[in-house]
Image: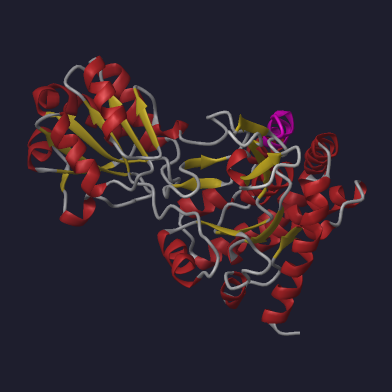
Amino acid sequence: MNIRDQITDMARATRKAARQMARLSTEVKNRLLENIARGLKEQEGFIQAENDKDLAAGREKGLSEAMLDRLTLSPKVINSMIQGLHEVAALPDPVGEISEMVKRPTGIMVGRMRIPLGVVGMIYESRPNVTVDAAALCLKAGNGVFLRGGSEAIHSNLALAQIIRDALVEESIDPAVVQVVPMTDREAINVMVSLEEFIDLIIPRGGEGLIRYVSEHSRIPVLKHYKGVCHLFVDETADFEMAIKIVMNGKVQRPGVCNSLEAMLVHRKIADHFLPLAAKELLEAGVELRGCATTCLLVPGCTPAQPEDWGMEFLDLILAVKVVDDLDEAMDHIVHHGSQHTEVIVTENYSNAQRFLREIDASAVMVNASSRFSDGGQFGLGTEIGISTTKLHAYGPMGLKELTARKFIVFGEGQVRA
């Protein structure tokens, strides 16, 4: 059987199984998630053995440390997946929720009901934990899920898929409701994004190249974010200690993720005092600073920034730094170089904070908090299936409700239209 036929048959099976999933009670869905969590705990050794195969292959291929970090299923990451499953199980089930019931002049009652999307297709790189996160959210929302992970994580993804499928069988649910594409050939992606008859939504998660490729070739609606170019603006009223703590967390903790900081903008009135203090800690942590002319004058060892550094997603210990005249210049810079992911202001000025919140168009806008909080789990979604920087139909981290749609429902007493 060729790749097209194999992928098509798998997607057809997921579509059929999704109908069963949509009918399940909240109790069964929650029990399923708890069983998956138990399976992850019991099979931790198996998961890490399979993950070690991927890590060894990744090192041979010369993957960067940031990529290897994303690929690693450490005990901490496995515990995080387990916790995510518990949290999703504890969330209210959105399926069947009825809202906005209104009586029309004709006497009919019109409202909205939340329903599953159907089959969600995920195309993602590196992070095998996405396999579990995506399955947890899709299953709780009553969807089927069709997963195509990166070749660098094939052993890890298939191991996690087997644990999920075992839990499905235990609950007498068709295991085809969760499918992981078993081949690494890129042709599988081309086939997958053409199957509009069986897949309702595609969510690509990975580098900008992958996301643009999927967006350009898909015949299915795509929810995406191309990159995470997150800025921190340090206003003239900022508390220096707070600002340094936030920039260090945003840049140093996990530089290879999409909610890490890539640029810091500093108000000119405080630059000569703040920048040397912040730069000292950043440089000691191994961060390379690429700054504007003013920044280079104030910070010995700072590399002059090139035009392409503004708006660059470094995904590394590199930070672009620019001194700006005021809030307006900071916001103009973000408009031109941001990616609508996450933007942060550190300020003690209420008016400036409110202007930043209102005027910055990003899926998450924060005042006096680290960009690293831009995450479904941190926002109380249990976990996330991805982050959308498009606005149809979701904006920001996507949780349970973003994996449902709303249909109109009507109650009548025999009314007919005049």
Residue depicted at 27% across the width and 29% down the height? 356
Q: Nearer the viewer, residue 368 or 190?
A: 190
Looking at the image, is 273 positioned above or below residue 174? above
Residue 395 image point, x, y percent: 46, 43
Looking at the image, is 34 positioned above or below residue 183? above
Residue depicted at 22% across the width and 52% down the height? 309
4 within the magenta span: no
Q: Nearer the viewer, residue 141 or 59?
A: 141
Residue 96 image point, x, y percent: 73, 38
Q: Would you say 374 lies left or right of 297 here?
A: right
| Image quarter (top left, top right, bottom left or bottom right) of the N terminus | bottom right
Q: Would you say 9 lies left or right of 257 here?
A: right
Looking at the image, is 185 positioned above or below residue 233? below
Q: Residue furthest bottom?
A: 1
Residue 165 image point, x, y percent: 82, 54
Q: Quadrant of residue 12?
A: bottom right
Residue depicted at 66% across the width and 63% down the height? 154
What number of labels is visible? 0
Instruction: Magenta stretch: give its range.
Output: 83-93
Predominant SS along the magenta part: helix
The answer to whether residue 162 is visible is: no
Q: Quadrant of residue 95?
A: top right
